[in-house]
């Protein structure tokens, strides 16, 4: 049994439902949409409780230092302060982490990055908490910091961990060891550190419970992995650490790791008061992991006609101070890092290392986004060398269904590379510049261009990404579906712990229930740990995996309902279906009213049917440690982009004029939501190509604000033509293919290619800065 | 109740404000629109003990014809400047620059006077005010004094307005019939200027009679590109000639190097933008 | 200090306001109106946009004291009929809402745009909404929503 807090916070999650129709394949509206447009939807930072106090975090000013002493006395003496806690106050294991438990909740003896939490403070006003935090006196002995990933790889450099600086080294070997080719192209490429820049800051409210446990309301991507870590740090069993998903203001990977979770719980348990923590934007830049920066060296060999013979790559990811999901990023970079092309011979070394830079981890398209810039630039170089178009080189070499990929896995569903590229070729190009409309020129409204120095370029990119968790991970989701009568109507309710972060999973859950159970109204239960894990909202996996779980739970419920109906009506269960709130025969004949059937106390003792199902996609395998060979992935999702840019070469200013794309989504459960994912994902990829970079100097973030970390505004974002293909994956529920990440992978390389085409410059680093274009 | 880090006052007269300011001394700070001060305070980069909000004083907001000049109240928001027909006729450069300040929300709150006294090197109002020869009307305990544009901007975030003084109005000499262009370079829309060039030009026939060219964010203060102005006097209204005249735009400047660009790139931008601004201002 | 203001047509009086508090904090934490969002608190993202005396401003860049005796309308006050305002309805129906954190600010900015310019062109929409960052949608469906709201408010097809 679990206890419910005596008072729920204002803004605590509640059931969400909408009576609107919408089965799979239709544009059902979001059930939380009305609350979101009226301002009533409660995000984690909106939670409020009587007697609530505010938590704040004391962070390391140094990238690498030994903690000599911490004096909390002056802070604790501040009027209004309820608690000041340090590592000594962590009752359980002071070590958390997604893949490796290598990160302290609060630093003990050493700080390993600037911004690492050292102490936490609770006070009755956020400003008092901040003032008190400044009075925590920490004496540091500054240590040499490792801030260059290449240097970290050198065994002679400072070793940050007993196991060394390498988090993971993945080797992929296929075919001949030293193949030769008539045409050889190579390049080095560098990708800067991108930030998820979700708008809703890290926030949550921890409420101490009477059973000695804690209830945590938080914005996250994966409640159960949070719960596991919070339990470990607090030394409490899972039944005493109950998590509920609060409103999430975007995530994009940045909420897969813990932020304020344990801190708020510690403060709540020490003060016996509800504790709210909300990061400000600057703190948010230090408070979550970022996209790994990468340095890459690539070489492709090909026949004179451009047919690929071999691919070699060395990829180095800077993981920063803690491992987070570096292992998975290395896994993707290694197994997918040559792009969706046919390579008879492969030699890849992919590394992720520890440094004293900000920790890096999950971000939309992890591992593939970085590699795509390199392999797509090299495909363009190859096309140029052999004298074919960028589109032709991709069509020639793109993988097809039935091919064996570079890790020896058969691609056993659609791989429409050639078609995706052809679709882009067939799309109309945007009109030539019209001198009359300054808004269409680089710079937009505050424009610096009247058409002077403007050249147009077009670029293509073709990429793919694995969907779901790979390499043998036990990837599953749990769904509890209940069908019952409410107010005389048959109503389904669905309960999963799968995080809704804005992508529209709750809409999909409703659509599946409507489709499978033939009802109109579907209640979405608040997401919490009172049901089994839904797995992470990442790796484009929720519609596939949680969708699969909801479908399976619905099928189990339906089987029971139809079996009962068969007893009553004389049809066999196989001849029956649920539709429009009725039990209908295959002939179309309405046999029974579903609400009446469910209300039959003899058949359904509790006036309803409930089933809970734990659902798994087909298993994947760990790859061979020496060759990288194995069936590592469950599914591949393909996308292609064409970018059209106008570049003011005198200023180095780029205006993306069009960002057109084609993507195979298997089955569009909600076509409008699919478009939304593609538009938003494409924009983030464009952002990395053009402007988005956390600038890190000697371990310090130089631009932790939206003033200096640039993200595209509505003026910087172009119109997009989008073509969706629906080649069902026979292994996936409804044939779905993950949607969220692919557009972020292919859009950036297309933009970079367009700028190269316009300027004739090599441009081997993203984001592409204006001075890279002007050469000044 | 928080132990106040500072007091807040919203006087309703200029005299009252000056008295408060005199009492507050070094620890007092004037709050105009707050669009720069409040973010800075939130980052704890400024921590005044006394905040004097000018928002409730009558007579500090508005744009009026003042004979040979246009008189602008210090508390006039950027939005009003951008949309003023009077300024459009007599000081079009100010309107052009005000339209590029941040975004609509900030233009509604941010004030002309606040931007000038804050004197952010990347701010968009100082350079136009400088090249238009603005006269700054400053009130203090000893009465009113007027400071010329050349003497107003003293250094990084520093102006001639003393700690016990308040900028009340700015007189902008009329530049009726002068073409104007504010060329602002940013990497994304609505950001601070990486570099900008303010140009206003009086053309006669096929030549430039007079030109004023100012640079934003090419040093700690807004800069008049005097050598460019001299070269432009009498210059033919031709792109090549104007480009030659503007080639020295970055001479003698000391632009910053930061995450938005290094000094050399800024010098390059200044030259390109100056040519474009002048061409456009001249109607080319 | 005490601050009194008209918010969404109702008089609110709040006491013991710390002088450093923003209007955004006062609305969210003292007046029970958390609709205006706290994404950057530096005036860059527009998520906290409210009307102050009839013009849209970033409430994070208004000191609470500056709002004393002023008139404020937040996202919670865009509709006083109990029905969604056409702008809200259009954002909902056009799929312009994903995580929704930017939505309240965008709704106020769109409401303001359409009250001044009932039929904005695409460039005018982009210009008016450039102060509002959205990280989820790529803005395409926001443009769709503004166009749909304009049509709807005009009685035309929506």
Image: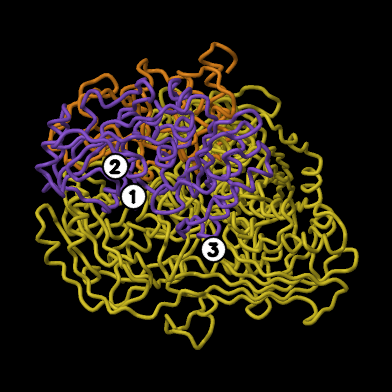
Chain colours: A yellow, B purple, C orange
From the top left corner, tell me how far across and down residue A93 is, in percent: 31, 71
**Labels 2, 3: front one:** 2
Near-viewer residue (A643 or A457):
A457
Near-viewer residue (A170 or B129):
B129
Residue located at (60% from left, 51% from top) = B247
The reply, left or right, for residue A379 in relation to residue B186 is: right
- Mark 1–mark 2 distance (CA, rounded to whole Å): 9 Å
Residue wearing tag 1 = A203
Count residues near mark 1 (Cα–Cα under 10 Å), then give few for <14, some for 14-19, many for 20+: many
From the top left corner, tell me how far across and down residue A583 is, in percent: 59, 27
The reply, left or right, for residue C145 in relation to residue B166 is: right
Contact between labelled residues 2 and 1, with CB atoms less than 8 Å apart: yes
Contact between labelled residues 3 and 2, with CB atoms less than 8 Å apart: no
Residue positioned most to the bottom: A156
Residue C108 higher or lower than A152, as above or below:
above
Residue A413 higher or lower than B29, as above or below:
below
Near-viewer residue (B164 or A301):
B164
Contact between labelled residues 1 and 3, with CB atoms less than 8 Å apart: no
* Same chain, labels 3 and 1: yes
The answer to whether residue A567 is visible is no
**Labels 3, 1: front one:** 1
The answer to whether residue B12 is visible is yes
| Chain bearing mark 3 | A
Residue wearing tag 3 = A474
Residue A170 higher or lower than A52, as above or below:
below
SS category of the residue bearing label 1:
strand
Residue located at (44% from left, 84% from top) = A158
Q: Going from the N terminus, do you reach mark 2 or mark 3 first? A: 2
């Amino acid at each position: 049994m679990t206890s419910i807090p005596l008072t729920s916070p204002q803004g605590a999650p509640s059931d969400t439902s909408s009576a609107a129709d919408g089965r799979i394949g239709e544009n059902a509206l979001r059930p939380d949409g009305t609350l979101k447009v009226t301002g009533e939807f409660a995000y984690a930072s909106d939670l409020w409780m009587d007697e609530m106090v505010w938590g704040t975090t004391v962070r390391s000013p140094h990238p690498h230092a030994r903690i000599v002493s911490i004096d909390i006395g002056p802070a604790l003496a501040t009027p209004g302060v309820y608690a000041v806690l340090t590592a000594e106050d962590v009752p359980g294991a002071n070590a958390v982490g997604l893949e490796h438990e290598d990160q302290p909740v609060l630093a003990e003896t050493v700080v390993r990055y600037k911004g690492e939490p050292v102490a936490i403070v609770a006070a009755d006003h956020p400003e008092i908490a901040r003032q008190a935090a400044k009075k925590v006196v920490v004496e540091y002995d500054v240590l040499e910091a490792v801030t260059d990933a290449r240097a970290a790889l050198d065994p002679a450099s400072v070793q940050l961990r007993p196991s060394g600086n390498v988090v993971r080294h993945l080797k992929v070997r296929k075919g001949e060891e030293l193949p030769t080719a008539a045409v050889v192209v190579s390049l080095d490429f560098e990708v800067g550190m991108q930030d998820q820049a979700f708008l809703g800051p890290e926030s949550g409210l921890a409420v101490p419970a009477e059973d000695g446990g804690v209830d945590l309301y938080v914005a996250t991507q994966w409640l159960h992995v949070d719960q596991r870590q919070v339990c470990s740090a607090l030394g409490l069993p899972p039944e005493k650490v109950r998590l509920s998903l609060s409103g999430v203001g975007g995530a994009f990977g940045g909420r897969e790791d813990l932020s304020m979770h344990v801190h708020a719980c510690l403060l709540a348990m020490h003060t016996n008061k509800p504790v709210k923590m909300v990061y400000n934007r600057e703190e948010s830049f230090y408070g979550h992991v970022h996209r790994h920066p990468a340095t890459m060296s690539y070489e492709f060999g090909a026949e004179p006609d451009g047919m690929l013979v071999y691919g070699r790559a060395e990829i180095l990811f800077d993981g920063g101070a803690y491992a987070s999901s570096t292992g998975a990023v290395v896994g993707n970079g290694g197994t997918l890092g040559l792009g969706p092309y046919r390579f008879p011979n492969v030699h890849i070394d992919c590394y992720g290392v520890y440094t004293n830079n900000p920790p890096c981890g999950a971000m939309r398209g992890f591992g593939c986004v970085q590699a795509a810039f390199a392999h797509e630039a090299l495909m363009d170089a190859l096309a140029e060398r052999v004298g074919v178009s960028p589109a032709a080189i991709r069509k020639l070499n793109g993988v097809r269904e039935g091919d064996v990929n570079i890790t020896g896995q058969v691609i056993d569903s659609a791989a429409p590379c050639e078609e995706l590229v052809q679709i882009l070729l067939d799309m109309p190009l945007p009109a030539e510049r019209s001198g009359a409309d300054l808004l269409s020129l680089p710079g937009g409204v505050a424009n610096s261009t009247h058409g002077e120095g403007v050249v147009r370029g077009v670029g293509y990119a073709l990429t793919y990404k694995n969907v779901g968790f790979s390499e043998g991970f036990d990837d599953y989701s749990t769904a509890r579906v209940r069908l019952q009568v409410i107010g005389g109507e048959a109503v389904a309710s669905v309960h999963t712990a799968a995080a809704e972060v804005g992508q529209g999973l709750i809409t999909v859950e409703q659509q599946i229930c409507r489709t499978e159970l033939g009802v109109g109204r579907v209640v979405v239960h608040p997401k919490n740990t009172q049901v089994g894990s839904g797995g992470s909202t990442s790796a484009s996996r929720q519609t596939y995996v949680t969708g699969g779980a909801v479908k399976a739970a619905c099928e189990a419920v339906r089987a029971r309902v139809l079996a009962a109906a068969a007893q009553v009506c004389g049809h066999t269960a196989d001849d029956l279906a649920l539709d429009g709130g009725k039990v209908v025969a295959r002939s179309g004949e309405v046999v029974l009213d579903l609400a009446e059937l469910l209300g039959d106390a003899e058949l359904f003792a509790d006036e309803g049917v409930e089933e809970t199902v734990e659902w798994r996609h087909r298993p994947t395998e760990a790859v061979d440690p020496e060759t990288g060979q194995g069936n590592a992935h469950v599914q591949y999702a393909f996308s292609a982009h064409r970018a059209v840019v106008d570049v003011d070469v005198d200023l180095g200013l780029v205006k993306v004029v069009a960002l057109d794309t084609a993507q195979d989504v298997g089955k569009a459960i909600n076509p409008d939501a699919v478009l939304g994912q593609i538009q938003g994902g494409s924009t983030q990829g464009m952002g990395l190509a053009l402007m988005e970079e956390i600038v890190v100097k000697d371990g310090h973030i130089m631009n932790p604000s939206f003033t200096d970390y640039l993200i595209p505004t509505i003026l910087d974002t172009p119109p997009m033509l989008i073509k969706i293909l629906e080649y069902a994956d026979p292994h996936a529920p409804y044939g779905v293919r993950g949607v969220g990440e692919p557009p972020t992978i292919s859009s950036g390389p297309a933009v970079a290619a367009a700028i190269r085409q316009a300027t004739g410059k090599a441009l081997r680093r993203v984001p592409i800065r204006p001075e890279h274009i002007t050469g000044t | 109740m928080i132990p106040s880090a500072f007091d807040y006052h919203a006087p309703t007269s200029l005299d009252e404000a000056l008295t408060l300011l005199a009492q507050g001394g070094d620890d007092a700070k004037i709050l105009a629109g707050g669009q720069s001060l409040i973010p800075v305070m939130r980052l704890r980069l400024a921590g005044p003990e006394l905040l004097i909000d000018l928002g409730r004083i009558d007579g500090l907001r508005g744009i009026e014809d003042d004979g040979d000049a246009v008189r602008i109240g210090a508390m006039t928001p950027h939005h009003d400047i951008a949309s003023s027909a009077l300024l459009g006729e007599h000081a079009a450069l100010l309107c052009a620059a005000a339209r590029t300040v941040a975004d609509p929300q900030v233009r509604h709150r941010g004030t002309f006077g606040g931007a000038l006294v804050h004197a952010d090197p990347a701010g968009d109002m100082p350079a136009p005010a400088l090249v238009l020869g603005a006269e700054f009307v400053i009130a203090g305990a000893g009465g009113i004094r007027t400071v010329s544009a050349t003497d107003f901007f003293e250094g990084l975030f520093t102006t001639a307005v003393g700690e016990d003084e308040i900028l009340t109005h700015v007189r902008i000499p009329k530049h009726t019939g002068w073409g104007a262009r504010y060329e602002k370079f940013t990497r994304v829309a609505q950001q601070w200027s990486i570099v900008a060039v303010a140009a206003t030009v009086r053309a006669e026939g096929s030549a430039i009679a007079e030109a004023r060219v100012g640079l934003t964010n090419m040093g700690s203060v807004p800069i008049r590109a005097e050598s460019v102005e001299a070269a432009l006097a009498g210059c033919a209204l031709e792109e090549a000639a104007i480009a030659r005249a503007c080639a020295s735009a970055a001479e003698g400047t000391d632009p910053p190097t930061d995450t938005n660009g290094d000094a050399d790139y800024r010098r390059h931008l200044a030259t390109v933008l100056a040519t474009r601004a002048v061409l456009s201002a001249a109607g080319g | 200090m005490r601050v009194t203001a008209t918010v969404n047509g109702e008089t609110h009086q709040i006491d013991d306001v710390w002088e450093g508090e923003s209007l955004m904090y006062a609305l969210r934490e003292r007046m029970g109106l958390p609709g205006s969002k706290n994404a950057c608190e530096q005036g860059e993202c527009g998520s906290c946009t409210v009307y102050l005396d009839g013009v849209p401003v970033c409430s994070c860049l208004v000191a609470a004291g500056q709002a004393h005796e002023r008139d404020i309308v937040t996202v919670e006050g865009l509709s006083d009929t109990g029905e969604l305002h056409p702008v809200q309805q259009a954002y909902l129906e056009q799929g312009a809402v994903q995580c929704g954190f930017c939505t309240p600010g965008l709704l106020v900015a769109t409401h303001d745009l359409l009250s001044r310019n009932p039929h904005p062109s695409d460039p005018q929409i982009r210009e008016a909404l450039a102060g509002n960052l959205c990280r989820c949608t790529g803005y395409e469906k926001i443009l769709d929503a503004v166009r749909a709201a304009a049509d709807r408010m005009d009685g035309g097809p929506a």
